[in-house]
Image (spheres, helix red, strand yellow):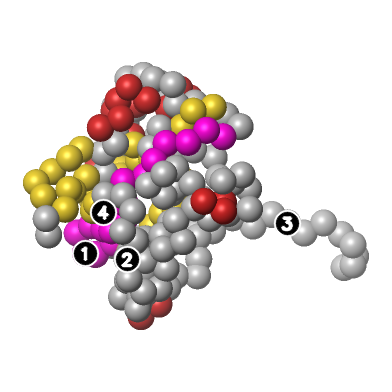
Amino acid sequence: MLINAPLPPTSQATIGPFFPRTYFQPGDNDLTRIATDAAPTTKGETILLRGQVRREGGVPCLNMILEAWQADAQGRFDHPLDPAQQRADPDFLGWGRAFTDAEGRYEFRTVMPGGFHDSTGARAPHVNLIVMGAGLMRLSMTTAFFPDHAAQHAADPVLALVDPARRPLLIATEEARDEGLRVFRFDLLLRGDAATETPFFEV
């Protein structure tokens, strides 16, 4: 055997390792506070973002991991790449993790994000979501927009990348209030036809 001989390719594996439910702690899906024992931010409107993750055929996906990140209520990030970092909300974490239950359902508590400008242009308020778990070969990233900001959607450079017929798949729908909070539903279909599959972006 030659030491430097090329190795034969192996088949592509799904994302792993997979985490047990004990990996998640209470409050991991709450972006409104920087720690579980910290007071939630008082800036902006607290909302619930929830939905269901399904695979082809509408089958619910159990124990999928979703990570969410977004700007604060004023459209700022507590991150060095944001020129307005010093004015970001210090009480808003802006990142969270959730997992799906047996029905494929997930939920995040967060604030309605503000719009902002970056190198691509004017961004409409949105929440970025990454999905990972069994059956996926790579991270799947998508973006949830909100129906309140339809006027800003037309100028958003990310939405502009999506076929106009499929853009409604990236707009969350408002449901009945829960806990006195507005609820936005954003379902994800990991695989389906062009009319139903959630648009995903390169990570």
Tell which of 9 and 123 is nearer to you.
Answer: 123
Q: Is residue 112 magenta?
A: yes
Q: Position of residue 21 (x, y in %)?
A: 34, 76
Inter-mark Cα distance, 3 to 4: 52 Å
Tell which of 58 and 75 is nearer to you.
Answer: 75
Tag 1: Cα neighbours inside 10 Å, few (<14), some, or many (≥20)?
A: few
Pointer 1 residue? 102
The answer to whether the residue labelled 3 contacts the one labelled 4, judged by CB atoms less than 8 Å apart, is no
- Residue 40's disc is 2
Residue 85 in the image: above or below residue 64: above
The answer to whether the residue labelled 2 contacts the one labelled 1, judged by CB atoms less than 8 Å apart, is no
* First in residue order: circle 1 vs circle 3: 3
Inter-mark Cα distance, 2 to 3: 53 Å
Q: Position of residue 22 (x, y in %)?
A: 35, 80
The answer to whether the residue labelled 4 contacts the one labelled 1, judged by CB atoms less than 8 Å apart, is no
- Residue 78's disc is none
* First in residue order: circle 2 vs circle 1: 2
The answer to whether the residue labelled 4 contacts the one labelled 2, judged by CB atoms less than 8 Å apart, is yes
What amino acid type is highlighted by mark number 3? Pro
**Residue at left offset 26%, top offset 44%:** 186
Tell which of 182 and 145 is nearer to you.
Answer: 182
Tag 3: Cα neighbours inside 10 Å, few (<14), some, or many (≥20)?
A: few
Residue 158 visible (yes or no) = no
Determine whether the residue tagged by mark 1 lies in a helix, strand or loop: loop
Residue 92 visible (yes or no) = yes
Pointer 4 residue? 46
The C terminus lies in which quarter of the figure? top right
Residue 199 in the image: above or below residue 139: above
- Residue 8's disc is 3
Tell me which segment is drawn in magenta.
100-118
Comparing labels 2 and 1, the label whose residue is closer to the camera: 2
